[in-house]
Image: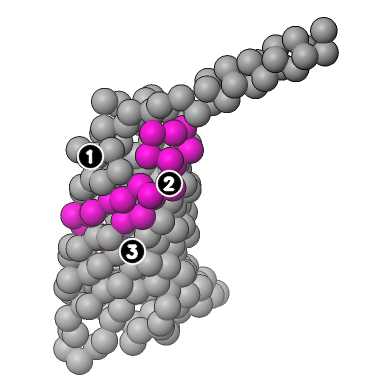
Amino acid sequence: MKRISNVLLWLVMVSGSSAVFAENDQTVVIGYGSGLHTFSTTDDLRQNGFFIDSMAGASDLYVEWYAFEEFGVGFRLNGLGVVETVSTLSTIEQRELSVGSSFITLNWVPVGASDYTRFGLLAGFGNSEYKYTELKDYATVNSVSTEGPATLLGGYVDWGGEDFGARFSLNLLNTDLAEKNGTKVDASGSYWTFDLRWAFR
């Protein structure tokens, strides 16, 4: 009787684990997430601010196609943005920063390619556009726009099957932006996002 009970318990455990770790065929993944970016340097423009010198909000929108289960390619849009306002009795000063980047990515899922929990890595190559604006009493007093090549390295943990799920990502962004009138700018740094994503075959 004890042996039968052990066999039944084993069968329940196997069937339960099969439901959790059943094969998960994700061919296309579409996701959007938001989080926080921390700059690795303080450039010539952002040093005039308070928190704008060190951090900004981050967002990612991406499409990934896994043609070979573990390996895939993707297209990703990344946005960084922060608005800082300083008010005194006589004036209102505002600083705005927006950085938009687009990447072609190479994706690799070394762990759990067919499971409901997947660990992935990505490398992206693309371009970044940087725009910084200073306003005083809502009038623009300084505006700088520039662009240049950018690269992205990241890792992520993905939860969910061939439908809706979630992802946590940690990425390293490196930008090589052109100087503007002798002003050096840089949006390089690291950022994390928490994403909602949809996967299907």
Question: Would you say the residues marked 1 and 3 are in contact, meaning their CB atoms lie under 8 Å apart?
Answer: no
The answer for how far apart the CA atoms under marks 2 and 3 are is 17 Å
Kind of residue at badge 1: Phe
* Mark 2: secondary structure: strand
Determine if residue 52 is in view: no
Q: Which residue is mark 1?
A: 68
Q: Which residue is mark 2?
A: 111
Q: Quarter-wise, where is residue 79 in the image?
A: bottom left
Using residue 153 as the reference point, say whether residue 101 is left or right of it: left
Q: Residue at x 43, y 62 (%)?
A: 191
- Specify the segment rendered in magenta: 96-122
Q: Which residue is mark 3?
A: 153
The answer for how far apart the CA atoms under marks 1 and 3 are is 21 Å
Determine if residue 175 is in view: yes
Query: Which label lies toward us, 1 or 3?
Result: 1
* Mark 3: secondary structure: strand
**Nearest the camera: 67 or 180?**
67
| Crowd band around label 2 with a 10 angstrom C-alpha radius: few (<14), some (14–19), many (20+) | some
Q: Which badge, 1 or 3, comes first in the chain's sequence?
A: 1
